[in-house]
Image: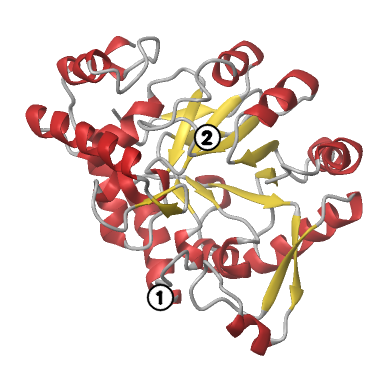
Amino acid sequence: MDPFEKGGLGKSKLRVTRMGIGGGALGGLYKDPGDAEAIATVRCALKLGVNFFDTAPLYGYGKSESRLGAALEKVERDRFVLASKVGRVLEPEDPAKLVARICEFDNAPAFRPVFDFSYDGVMHSFEESLKRTQLDRIDLLHIHDPDEHYDQVIREAYPALHKLRDEGVIRAIGAGMNQAEMLVRFAKECDFDCFLLAGRYTLLDHRALKELLPICVERRISIIVGGPFNSGILATGARAGAKFNYQDASPEIQEKVAQIEAICSLYQVPLKAAALQFPLAHPAVAAVIPGCRSEAEVEENIKMISFDILPAFWQELRRKEVIPEEAPTAVEQ
């Protein structure tokens, strides 16, 4: 596969590379790379040919947005596509409380993310994102994790995004979630350009295949696949402490990954290559955005997407019922 091939995002005019960069790691998810390393990571990706970068106020409590802005500030604006999110606002926090609270972002600044899907909350969040990035625009804006807030999103957040898109302040609108079911509802009832689907269409989790992906193809809604390694286990392999969906992987998941690893070994396919290429084969999927916190990780992910995988490998995964019979693979396109 060509990680630098560009495709459209839904009915918008945006075109993104098949590989993008997920900004959670840049914000210090689990481990903080530091400002210099994060900025170098972004610039490396851009230099090698990646044009798509995804971030959010939640990621590092503002650090991811700020670091992306610093890395991209002198870059010709049309050379890259920047996505961010609304739905959480950052409120100042007592540093003492921050230290006492378990935070998944390492070295997080003294802010507390608060859900806010109100019209004014969306507008405020967007303005704060512009300030943190110090860029003239954000191209794609997602509604972030609205799992318990569907009614308010429809009444307030969704109209706010439409207004921003109609005014040309943003170029595309989407929703980013760790579930497929509500995105199906959004696809049926609303007018979105794309969805960021995290962890629900991977080598391990195929729940988006039956309903969400077909309706997205039908309605020209592009899927951006986040979390292609399912929080890590599809990168590290089955081992003690490996993460799946942000938690320690269960024995059942460990066993399934070990089975995949055995097939990878038989066909000499890196596990990461299979994990990154599998979702990209579906016609609904525009891009995959693995998190990267170093130049080496950027280079490795590019190499993994470019790795030549023989048809027999995918056929073996089907035969062993690791992937569904109806799931497309690259060699069939």
Number of numbered labels in the structure image: 2
Q: Residue at x 41, y 70 (%)?
A: 31
Q: Position of residue 292 (x, y in %)?
A: 38, 56
Q: Position of residue 232 (x, y in %)?
A: 35, 50
Quadrant location of residue 19?
top left
In the image, residue 269 sits, relative to residue 226, either above or below, namely above
Q: Quadrant of the C terminus?
A: top left
User: Which residue type does callout 1 highlight?
Assistant: Ala
User: Which residue type does callout 2 highlight?
Assistant: Ile
Q: Residue at x 68, y 50 (%)?
A: 85
Of marks 2 and 1, the one in the foreground: 2
Q: Which mark is residue 36?
A: 1
Quadrant location of residue 147?
top right
Regarding mark 2 in the picture, which secondary structure is present there? strand
Label 2: few (<14), some (14–19) or many (≥20) C-alpha neighbours in 10 Å? many
Q: Residue at x 56, y 68 (%)?
A: 60
Of mark 2 and mark 1, the one earlier in the sequence is: 1
Front in this rendered view, residue 322 or 287 = 322
Q: Which mark is residue 224?
A: 2
Q: Are marks 2 and 1 in contact (CB under 8 Å)?
A: no
Regarding mark 1 in the picture, which secondary structure is present there? helix
Q: Position of residue 227 (x, y in %)?
A: 45, 44
* In this rendering, position of residue 11 left or right of residue 309: right
